[in-house]
Amino acid sequence: MALAINKRTGKSVNVPEHYLGHPVLGKDLEPAGSVVKAAPKKENSKKFAKQVPDAVDGDGDGLIQDGTIWQRLANTKTEEQPAPTNIEENEE
Amino acid sequence: MATKMLRPNVGLYVATYDAFVDWTAPTLDEITSATKVFNISPAVTDDYTLNMTDSESDDSLAIIDNASVQTPTYTNYEASLDGFRDANVAADSVYNKFRTLFAAPDVKYYLIKRVGKLHNAAFAAGDEISVYGVKTDFPIEILGDGEMIRTGARFLTTGEVRVNIDVAAGSAGSGPELKAVVGTKSTSNGKIRVYWVPSGNLSGTEAEFLAEPSVTDIEATGSIDLTGAIAWDGYDLGASDSNKIDDRGILDEGQVQTRGFAQFSGSLTFFRGVTSETAGAYYNAYEAFKAATDGSRPVGFLVTRVGIPAETALAADQEVSAFKFIADAFMDNTEGEDSVKFMVNFAPQGNLAVNVDTVV
């Protein structure tokens, strides 16, 4: 059994090995390995999302910035936290 | 002296679902409508079925009963008509009328039988008729070596049945419509083509292919015209009666059926070419299905074209049927004095189209 791609229709099919190279059954078939490309790398939208302090719950689902690392409840307020002035205290 | 009635004092007619105001009491003007009632008698083969059958029964006993009891409950009936296929698909004939009336599933009709007069004798008030309500099932192609091609009209019952009722008075029309040309019978031999179209060869979706089978896909490289390799011996390909599901309402007094899953089957016997052959119909058929145990199990459609001379090229607007299958068991047939053959059983895959027109 071999995985092949039909060059005319673009469909992938399982076929008996002897179909590949066969003058009638395999003329439009190409081994899948020779034409299949790796799937495009999936972008991680969470990685690039920026926090929006005044985000609005546009879809009314009770969440804002849905699907990002900044996803939170709609009634949650975020405030900039000042940088610590005393490092030692912070480490404690 | 009593005189026996001889053949052919019977007529079969089809009325559209809206032909009667009250189907239990057809009037003369209704049954002689030339637009809603059709005389199909010349097309129907002699082994038709249109009759009541044993009613369902209840076997409840009373304490005083001393033998079995069977009390009829609702009535049963069955309908199944085979009609000759016209060699000329364009003729305005009774054969083609029969085929057109029953070409699609789920169409409601009343089938009418009159016994006692020739089929083309004018209707008169007082004629006794039997009326059977039906819905069409998928039609069946009936083929055979040395046999005529027939269309098998199959039906589901609607529970509406009245036998031997009088035609009520009215003014007679010109119907039932009876085509002037009966038709030309067509032999099965040389009038069938069968193609194998692998699923990977479909340029669109399966649904699109079933709605409008593409000539391009059917003839593309990788699809095979199996016709020249198929032997009559063991030929079995096409739709059969759908599952009939009992589906009565509380008002129904007769057998009511709903169409369940469509049924179709495929089993073809192919000639085996000599081993030195590396081309041709026998070789291609063998190559297509020989690897029955490697796990690949070819999936595709068997497409049939029936009634058109096999040498006629496939083109748009030709009626075909398509059935989705997985090629299954491969069996050698080396017995007897005839040539060596092999049989391939195809397992149905739930999708079919019957009598649809091809497109380019």
Image: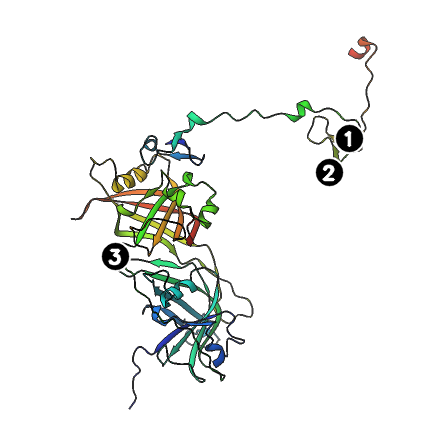
Residue B243, position as x, y percentages in the image: 44, 57
At 45% from the left and 40% from the top, the residue drawn is: B203
Q: Which residue is mark 1?
A: A55
Outermost residue on the left side: it is B337
Q: Is residue B106 visible?
A: yes
Above or below, B255 relative to B2: above
Residue type highlighted by circle 3: Asp
Residue B120 placement: quadrant: bottom left
Marks 2 and 3 on same chain? no
Q: Which residue is mark 2?
A: A59
Q: Do callouts 1 and 3 mark residues in contact (Cβ within 8 Å)? A: no
Residue type highlighted by circle 2: Asp
Residue B34 placement: quadrant: bottom left
Marks 1 and 3 on same chain? no
Q: Is residue B325 visible?
A: no
Callout 3 secondary element: loop
Q: Which chain's residue wears label 3?
A: B
B15 vs B261, nearest the viewer: B15
Above or below, A3 relative to B18: above
